[in-house]
Structures are given as C-alpha cells and as structure tokens.
C-alpha cells in the first residue's frame, strides 16, 4: 500500500503544500508552519519535512530565511493579453504594450536597453524576415522588469531596409516603442502594422538566463518568437523573448470574424 512506502510522507507534504500555494491558500510572503508543526501534522520526521521544503524551494515556490522558517515566494506576475484592440489603444497612449499592461495591473514596468547592434541575421530570424541568411539586421536587446525584478529578455530584429538611418539603429530608447515609430505617419518608415504570429516553446534555462532573470532552480522559461507583419503582409520585426515561466500568464484573443 502507498502508506507503507517510506517516501510517502515526503511526497504528501510536497503535494499538499504545493497545491495550497498554487491555489492561493497561502498568500505571497506568508510563513509556512514550523518544521516541528509540519512534522507533527504529517507524522513525519523533521528531516523529511526539510526534504519537502527543499523541493518547494527548488521549484521556486518558497524561500527560506535563517532562523525564521519558510515563506511563500513573492514574485511579480504580468498577464499579457494580446489583442488588436489592446495594441491600438496602447499606440494611442504612446506606450509600449508591455509597459501599458503592467501599469494597468498596478505594477511598475521598466524596459532596460542593453544594446543596439548590427549583426548577421540568425537563420531562424532571416527566414521569418524573408531575407537572405546572414544578411545584416539591427537588433535591439532589452531586459524587461516588473517592480525592479527581471522577468524577461527580449531581442528585437529589424531588416536593415527598415531600420537603417532611423532611431531603431541608435543606442537610445524610443518613445512609445519601435512599433510606434514604424507606424508614425510623419516618421521615417510609415508602415502600418497588421498582424503578428507567435511561436511558443518551453524549456529549461541556460546558466546565463538563470543569472540574468534571477531564476530559482527548477523554473523553466518560455521562448516566444513573434513575427510582426504590415498590411502588405511584409515582415517588419522578429521578437525573441525569453520569459520566466513563473512570472507570466499569456492570453491570446483572435477575432475570427
């Protein structure tokens, strides 16, 4: 029987505490019961309790503080809702979509510009931009933060035919974001955005991504590869985002009419 398995108390502690945290029975920042109390509740040793807490810590659900115990980890979560109506409203507000949605959720956004470079297009990017492989592109590398905590890395690639001799190729921030510049009827590009296509995959992070995003052990990332097209169905931009999976919720609404 399952109860005769010596690892059963350990699994039961992990499963029940994990479920309580994920369903909101424990609030962010709330202290879990002490080791001795959990040991008494589950009729397990304190060693077993410590092992269970270690698993929850590795999953990024709790943090431990010397002499204080284990606490539910508090992380900012941004809910990204992709709709045409949202996009147009944010353009009118002269705000990048990420910033606008984070502000609407009562949090503090930041897009930190890391670098602006001219590079040879990676094969995957060249294919989506419909340019020759290794053709020169402009890439703008940014780190997205919510409440001062990194949540995603985003590299945006633009064909040289669009970006050359524009603010996109300059190492400075663009008010309203690059798409606002691209659509500006008085600007240097004057193209109208029509649609985007997103490809999402999940994987475990690289060591560099763990460091950059401050990920706890066991937390995966979501890779979002978005291609943005104009009204003539010509690709304008490819965005590669590496997002911390425990800090994002994605929602896509597609008008099929």
Image (tube, grey):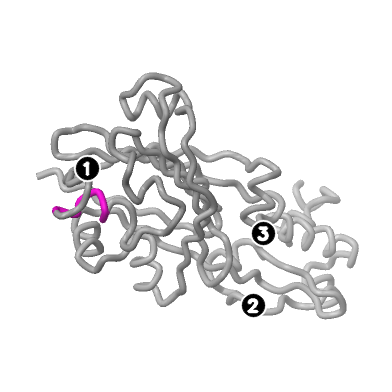
Query: Which quadrant of the rendered structure holds the C terminus?
Result: top left
Q: Which residues are magenta?
A: 180-185
Task: Assess whether residue 241 is covered by the magenta stretch.
Answer: no
Query: Mark 2 sits on what residue?
Result: 29
Of residues 180 and 13, the one drawn nearer to the viewer in this rendering: 180
Specify whether 85 is left or right of 238.
left
> Contact, CB < 8 Å: mark 3 with mark 2?
no
Query: Mark 1 sits on what residue?
Result: 195
- Counting from the top left corner in percent of width and height, residue 210 is at 67, 50
Q: Secondary structure at mark 3?
A: loop
Query: Mark 3 sits on what residue?
Result: 60
> Callout 3: 10 Å neighbours few (<14), some, many (20+)?
some
- Counting from the top left corner in percent of width and height, residue 220 is at 60, 46
Of residues 244 and 28, the one drawn nearer to the viewer in this rendering: 244
Residue 59 found in image quarter:
bottom right
Residue at image x 34%, y 73%?
104
> Contact, CB < 8 Å: mark 2 with mark 1?
no
The numbered disc on residue 73 is: none
Mark nearer the N terminus (3 vs 2): 2
């Amino acid at each position: 029987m399952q109860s005769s398995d010596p690892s059963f108390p350990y699994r039961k502690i992990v499963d029940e505490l994990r479920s309580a945290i994920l369903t909101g029975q424990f609030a962010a920042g709330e202290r879990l019961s002490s080791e001795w109390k959990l040991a008494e509740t589950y009729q397990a040793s304190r060693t077993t309790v410590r092992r269970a807490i270690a698993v929850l810590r590795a999953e990024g659900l709790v943090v431990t503080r010397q002499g204080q115990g284990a606490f539910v980890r508090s992380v900012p979560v941004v809910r990204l809702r992709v709709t045409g109506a949202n996009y147009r409203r944010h353009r009118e507000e002269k705000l990048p979509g990420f910033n606008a949605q984070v502000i609407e959720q009562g949090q503090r956004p930041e897009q930190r510009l890391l670098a602006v470079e001219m590079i040879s297009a990676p094969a995957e990017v060249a294919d989506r931009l419909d340019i020759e492989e290794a053709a020169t592109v402009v890439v703008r590398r940014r780190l997205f933060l919510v409440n001062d905590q990194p949540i995603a890395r985003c590299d945006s690639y633009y064909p040289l035919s669009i970006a050359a001799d524009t603010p996109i190729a300059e190492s400075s921030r663009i008010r309203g974001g690059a798409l606002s510049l691209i659509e500006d009827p008085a600007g240097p590009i004057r193209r109208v955005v029509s649609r985007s296509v997103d490809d999402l995959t999940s994987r475990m992070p690289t060591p560099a991504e763990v460091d950059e995003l401050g990920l706890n052990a066991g937390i995966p990332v979501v890779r979002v590869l978005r291609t943005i097209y104009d009204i003539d169905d010509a690709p304008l931009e490819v965005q590669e985002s590496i997002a911390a999976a425990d800090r994002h919720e994605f929602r896509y609404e597609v008008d099929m009419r």
